[in-house]
Amino acid sequence: MGQKFVELLANHPWFEVEALAASDRSVGKSYIETTGSKASTLPESLQKLTVVEAKPGAIDDPDIVFSALPTEVAGPIEEDFAKSGLPVFSNASSHRMDQHVPLLNPEVNAEHVALVEEQKKRTRLDGFIVANPNCTTAILTLSLKPLYDAFGLETVVVSSMQAISGAGYPGVASLDILENVIPFIRSEEEKVERETNKILGSISQPAGVTVSASCNRVPTINGHIEAVFAKTKSRATPEDVVKAMSGFVSVPQKLKLPTAPAHPIVVRKEEDRPQTRLDVDEGHGMTVSVGRVRKDAGLGGVKYIVLGHNLVRGGAGCSILNAELMLAQKYIQ
Amino acid sequence: MGQKFVELLANHPWFEVEALAASDRSVGKSYIETTGSKASTLPESLQKLTVVEAKPGAIDDPDIVFSALPTEVAGPIEEDFAKSGLPVFSNASSHRMDQHVPLLNPEVNAEHVALVEEQKKRTRLDGFIVANPNCTTAILTLSLKPLYDAFGLETVVVSSMQAISGAGYPGVASLDILENVIPFIRSEEEKVERETNKILGSISQPAGVTVSASCNRVPTINGHIEAVFAKTKSRATPEDVVKAMSGFVSVPQKLKLPTAPAHPIVVRKEEDRPQTRLDVDEGHGMTVSVGRVRKDAGLGGVKYIVLGHNLVRGGAGCSILNAELMLAQKYIQ
Amino acid sequence: MGQKFVELLANHPWFEVEALAASDRSVGKSYIETTGSKASTLPESLQKLTVVEAKPGAIDDPDIVFSALPTEVAGPIEEDFAKSGLPVFSNASSHRMDQHVPLLNPEVNAEHVALVEEQKKRTRLDGFIVANPNCTTAILTLSLKPLYDAFGLETVVVSSMQAISGAGYPGVASLDILENVIPFIRSEEEKVERETNKILGSISQPAGVTVSASCNRVPTINGHIEAVFAKTKSRATPEDVVKAMSGFVSVPQKLKLPTAPAHPIVVRKEEDRPQTRLDVDEGHGMTVSVGRVRKDAGLGGVKYIVLGHNLVRGGAGCSILNAELMLAQKYIQ
Amino acid sequence: MGQKFVELLANHPWFEVEALAASDRSVGKSYIETTGSKASTLPESLQKLTVVEAKPGAIDDPDIVFSALPTEVAGPIEEDFAKSGLPVFSNASSHRMDQHVPLLNPEVNAEHVALVEEQKKRTRLDGFIVANPNCTTAILTLSLKPLYDAFGLETVVVSSMQAISGAGYPGVASLDILENVIPFIRSEEEKVERETNKILGSISQPAGVTVSASCNRVPTINGHIEAVFAKTKSRATPEDVVKAMSGFVSVPQKLKLPTAPAHPIVVRKEEDRPQTRLDVDEGHGMTVSVGRVRKDAGLGGVKYIVLGHNLVRGGAGCSILNAELMLAQKYIQ
């Protein structure tokens, strides 16, 4: 995920990578040394950047911190940066459920940015933390948002088929996943169930949607694809759902944020799409692709397929969009 | 599937392969010619068997017909064989939903064999057709049976991750499935929803369970793995479900049929099992492996994972077990 | 391969797709119908183009014909188009070894274009056929060219690991290649051995290099990677070879042809590169990536790895570069 | 590899697993805890065996030591066990090239066992170390042996396509190998070149064969497949080679050792075999499968494909066969 942040920021119109920081033995090495040959398509200046220790003093006057730190260490380090007065945009799960930390998927809950006021009051500091959702949740909630707004949501059942890049590097051993399905990803189902409610909810209370997830790892590289069964509060036919999703645009599109896709949701008409490999890069990875919207007898609502790029919409791209949103709305100077 | 039938019958204690028949350009060739080098581990006598045309007169006095014909042609050919007085055990979907054709998954609905009496009356012939279920359905219904018996079943939501061998040969093009998920398998969801009710139902009426499926193709070779969400009629905790499944045995076990696995359902205790590649051959492919039995908030019941071998329990193995059952019960002389 | 032609031509600065033709049941359908959803990122005008029959009269006044016809039918159809006065750029193997047909890999043997004069004399017509090499050969010969020029070549031994897209669509069945290596590709080794000599040779005689190939199919999507062992005529150290390859540019670069990559050969310094998935798109698929150049005790020369995109450098891209070359050199008006 | 040793020894007719030892944090855990659910098909007594530290005193009176220790630590630990009087059969590369350590592939160089006499003299102890070859080398040398004996060998060029299990667990990250080829395996080529000469050589000097290898990792699970180009000293046609290989048997077959396959080499007649997934388990993994024997213009000899199971013939199976050989020949009491 750290590599995806660097890749997306390398040519960003608003942000410039000034420093790379880590919490582990990468410190002191050049970025290219830590990634092996994988970063060799980046600008040379980035390749040669020396990785510093991830603590406030180590970086010379940064403006924004993006964090792809491992969850085990992210919590206190991110707090330190926030305490030092910096806005921290984090992909770690450590602070996602903190009451005053926005869990932000900008097309879904842009209004949650206001939580940082409360957060700053509490900490009496200028800095703050904003989290982006778990990858599976970011993709799911974006597809659910138009339904939630138009029809209300009672229950969501979701079974995911998640790519290996979701587990980081080295992550999943090839012996574990080649020609295999692993029907278990630690803590993932709990995250989907919990975070979906915070994101779809208002600034003051969760959405009250019953969510049940079954999360599976499959041998694909990028792209989480999810079979969704959803019961809305008011009746919605598949046609209603397609209509609500197809026209959907939100705050990032209206603000023309650089990372915002023109269409956050694309609804495919083909009977066999979206497919992971074919559609994962839709909207440069920021669009989720929906397909096969049809009646669901199980919950008495609709069922559909949604696919998104787990490292972009489900991670670094979402976090960068969060920063763009807060910059556009003057939360950051 | 035809190859799996031959492989399983090659060393069967009760049955002997006398003839191989086909409906296509294989006719007239030796079996090894039609399969390429894949059949080269079979006894040489089988490899050299000349494929004849699939019609009653072409085979010299057979006792039983196993059919793995493609659905497009299976229907009338199987009827012809039945009319000629033969018991036909079919893997094709053509006759599965016929009122008087048993759709037989022997551990689940052995009592449905009685339907052939009605079928024979209707046709005034000695022959009959018995179908085995769709692969995904065979695996699913075996796992559901102990729940249906102990607690009753209201609703089942299932999302499958199915292996490529389920599509036959050449079947799925490698360009379509390598590093990909295809969230669509033609007619599969309808089959699962329809057949589950016939199988779990009584001889005279369907079970009345609401079933909703979302079927996906993933890059695995053998083994369909399914994320199941089930609402029982009377309350059942995960522990209740594990208990009901673990001890489950049925008619084939009691009759000690040669193809019946000692344990039709194995419940795994590890948090990350069953896995397709590791567990697909459990019970020589006749056992389904269940894992991750846990509470489901979505339907208000339980959710679990079930895995089975789509060509064995979900196909040829099930059909052979059907024949064994009917032979043991004197429906065949 | 046909799809790759359309994709590369869709935004070409010099060429415009006026018509699509086929020899099979695609005729009469719109392009999008024949490809399924795979062509859906193309301009809509292309998607809707009706496929016509592949014969001269069926297309309204074309200027150039690109042929990705299957080898079984390509021969006579391509001749018909040439006879009708058109330049035909063919990816089929039918005419590759014809004496007066240039087998053109533009950075390697641009001077072979002169063969069309002879070809036209023979046929007394304005049209002509130009072939691009077999995919494995196009990649191999581009990497060999600087060695051939600088040191001469005696012997080349090559073992390839080829992607599934090389076999077209549906091509390789997933059951045949998932988690497998198939050490056989029909006629491939003969093509590599034969075509390499025609391409590296002069306009009047083959190069006289002894070539021996062992061709293997592996489970990758795009990109043929080859282990090459080469004995040069005059002594060349690995350093000499790296130097000769690194600076290599040729006619297409000098003419600044639109499809010509800035660097036809990139030599990687990392010990574990090139890798198929990471490097296949180098130079938009027109560059071959070389790595691991080292001494070879076997033939007494050097050994190295070369990777190229089989559908671009090894197919459609090469053919389009051929047309650009001949247009720039006024062989086409 | 450790797991494969345990699996193969679990039902061995001569040997019984008394203790499992490790050099890392597995010490003190039960075997099943260290392997996760993967060992769950083993006898329960083995699953529950507590892993002890790998040092002589920690195991109660063993008779034989099998070592699958990582190379980094294997050297001194194996020496300690040998010093304590025990025969050590090692899969590590640490001692393979030691002058008095037999590098034993029993069908190829059974006579090398005599080296242990010299080894014992030198160490003045009853214990000794016997190494099995590198996986790729074990497979290669078994296929070369009949050629070496019948025609002599001058040069061997080999390009391997090796399975992920060769790198141990967790070994190759899935992000590195899914849909990819990595044309580099550290130290592998040197091992193949060096060990082949020791194995084919006499007890007192290496074979003097020029060997050049190019080693590649491909996305398969088990089975190394190799494209071999070989120049024999006296002329040998493909037919000669097939004949020499087909009838080949050696000391382990004559002694009827339990792990010896009936046919150490199987020559396939099909044009597209052997294939990794289809043929890897030939002879329970102890047989190598050869195919596509044909003339090679490159070296002026023959070329062929050979496949073997890297963990069985290329590892644990070979080591166990070594122990069987030495027990049968009374080197072990």
Image (cartoon, coloured by chain):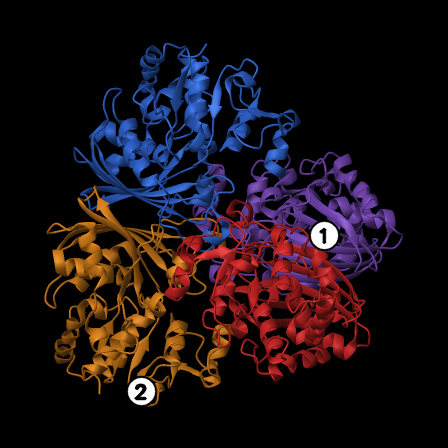
Chain colours: A red, B purple, C orange, D blue
Residue toward you, C65 or C143? C143
| Same subunit, tags 2 and 1 | no
Q: Secondary structure at mark 1?
A: helix
Characterize the local packing of mark 1: few (<14), some (14-19) or many (20 or more) Cα atoms within 10 angstroms: many
Which residue is the site of mark 1? B140
Q: State the image coordinates of residue B234 (x, y, percent, origin top left).
A: 89, 52
Residue toward you, A257 or A50? A50
Characterize the local packing of mark 2: few (<14), some (14-19) or many (20 or more) Cα atoms within 10 angstroms: few
Q: CA distance from mark 2 to mark 1?
A: 57 Å
Inspect the image, locate mark 2, and give the three-letter code of the amino acid beneath it: Pro
Quadrant in the picture for residue C85: bottom left
Residue D261 seen anywhere in this rendered image of the structure: no
Which residue is the site of mark 2? C62
Residue A333 drawn above or below residue B326: below
Is C106 left, or right, of C45 in this rendering?
left
Count of marks overlaid on the render: 2
- For the C terminus of chain C, give its image quadrant: bottom left
Quadrant in the picture for residue D318: top left
